[in-house]
């Protein structure tokens, strides 16, 4: 058995032990809630509402998060189409299985950790603390519900953190430039 095969088998076994998708009860309900709380459509609506109703600091936070999520989603999809790792077998998460049959890396893990890192960089501190508790719960819930392997969420989390750290260094000139092109103040 090759090292790659050994690692993938170990990953599948550990992921299977964490799975609660087929087990009714409170733990499954908890996992369903957190697995969906990282959905991109939910965050798009929330960030648009925050931008529309917030002051300039919240507008800036929303724009940076929205732009980061959008660019990160394209990066994650590119990697998924290169790697082409199939999701674990299962019934739950049909929308994910039908629209995106690939699991590596986890877009939900990448997105949730990006959101937490950007909140840490732009504040407020209370939101950052809540989001750092939330992000790992989203990632683990994706494995618990059987739509990802552990290695998918680890890779997604690392990708989201790295992308956010880079983004926090370059967002101001990039978004100022974009604002000048579209002639709309972003915040």
Image (spheres, rainbow, N blue to C red):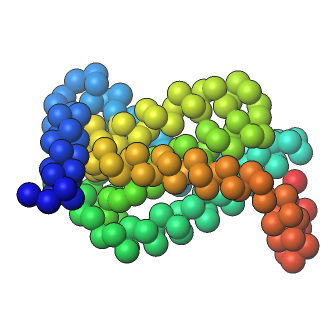
**Going 43% across and 68% down the picture, which residue do you hit?**
79
Residue 110 visible within the image: no
Left or right of 158 on screen, residue 48: right
Asked which quadrant contains residue 144, the reply is top left
Residue at 60% over, 27% down: 130
Give how far across and how far down residue 178 sits, in percent.
Answer: 83, 71
In the rendered image, the vertical position of residue 117 relative to residue 179, given as above or below? above
Residue drawn at (81%, 48%) of the image: 59
Residue 150 sits in which quadrant?
Answer: top left
Q: Quadrant of the N terminus?
A: bottom left
Q: State how many labels appear.
A: 0
**Left or right placement of residue 121 versus residue 72 in this view:** right
Q: Quick check: 172 above or below 29?
A: below
Residue in the foreground of this view, choosing between 1 and 15: 1
Q: Would residue 122 be visible to someone looking at this image?
A: yes
From this view, report whether residue 132 is shown above or below residue 9: above
Comparing 55 with 148, the one in front is 148
Where residue 63 sits in the image (x, y, percent)? 75, 54
Can you give x and y, in whole percent of width and height, for residue 23 in the image?
16, 31
Question: Which percent across, then down, holds residue 153?
Answer: 39, 47
Q: As drawn, which residue projects farthest toward the left?
A: 1
The residue positioned farthest toward the bottom in the image shown: 181
Quarter holding the C terminus? bottom right
């Amino acid at each position: 058995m090759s090292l790659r095969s050994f690692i993938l088998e170990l990953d599948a076994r550990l992921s299977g032990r964490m799975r609660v998708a087929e087990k009714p009860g409170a733990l499954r309900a908890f996992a369903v809630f957190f697995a969906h709380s990282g959905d991109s459509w939910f965050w798009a609506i929330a960030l648009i509402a925050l931008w529309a109703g917030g002051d300039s600091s919240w507008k800036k936070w929303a724009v940076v998060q929205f732009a980061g999520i959008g660019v990160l989603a394209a990066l994650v999809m590119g990697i998924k189409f290169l790697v082409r790792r199939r999701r674990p077998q299962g019934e739950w998460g049909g929308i994910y299985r039908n629209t995106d049959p690939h699991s590596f890396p986890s877009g939900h893990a990448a997105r949730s950790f990006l959101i937490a890192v950007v909140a840490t960089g732009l504040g407020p501190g209370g939101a950052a603390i809540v989001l750092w508790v939330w992000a790992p719960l989203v990632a683990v819930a994706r494995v618990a519900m059987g739509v990802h392997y552990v290695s998918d969420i680890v890779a997604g989390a690392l990708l989201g953190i790295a992308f956010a750290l880079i983004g926090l260094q370059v967002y101001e000139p990039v978004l100022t430039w974009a604002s000048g092109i579209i002639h709309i103040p972003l915040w």
